[in-house]
Image: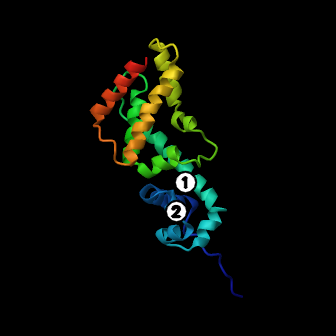
Amino acid sequence: MVIYMARKESISRDGILDVAFAMMKEEGIISVTARKLAAKANCSTQPIFRVFKSLEEMEQAIFLKAVTYFEDFYLAFAQRSNIPFVNLGMAYIRFALDNKNIFSLLFISDKRHGRTLYDLINGESGAVSKEISKAKAAGIKDASDLFMKMWMVIHGSACMSLTGDYDLSENDTQKLLEESYKAFS
């Protein structure tokens, strides 16, 4: 009697997701196709569709990994200013400069998998909520309105970095954000 053993699965969901995330980080989400991913992961497309029911499910998993990546980046970013919204802005702009494709996926794409831009920025850490509270503690009556004004400067600056049109140094960026805060408050 011959007993056939089931083939041992050599590639895991996490392994496939790691390769897909690296591809998205390098080339953008549009480049992550089943065939390209299979070639990069050194497998056929079969294991990909064994662990993900569809490309949409895989894209959502990549998106969630990108959300965590941004959160980790923000939490690790060095705090340079005591003025509300400045550190958040500096981290956001630096993230855009350093991670164009991840930034585009999270903050420019209309495919946010049920999350708003505010949800993504505020994140698990409550970054925006903390900054609004900090502004209120500093005497700002309408801190939410001030945040929206600051956000236009912050998001606009970050978006300019995607096209290479943002060339301010970190010190100049900090100065811009601090001066914007003072002008808007």
Whether residue 160 is situated above or below residue 182 in the rendered picture: below
Type of colouring: rainbow
Residue neighbourhood size for the residue with mark 2, other residues' Cα within 10 Å, grouped as few (<14), some (14–19), many (≥20)? many
What is the C-alpha distance between the residues marked 2 and 1?
10 Å
Contact (Cβ within 8 Å) of mark 2 with mark 1: yes
**Which of 184/132 is in front?**
184
Q: Which residue is mark 2?
A: 32
Amino acid identity at mark 1: Ile
Amino acid identity at mark 2: Val
- Residue 40 position, x and y percent, is 47, 68
Residue neighbourhood size for the residue with mark 1, other residues' Cα within 10 Å, grouped as few (<14), some (14–19), many (≥20)? many
Quadrant, the N terminus: bottom right
Drawn side of residue 47 relative to residue 88, left or right: right
Drawn side of residue 156 relative to residue 142, left or right: left
Whether residue 157 is situated above or below residue 14 in the rendered picture: above
Drawn side of residue 3 relative to residue 66, left or right: right
Residue at the location (49% across, 58% down)?
Answer: 18
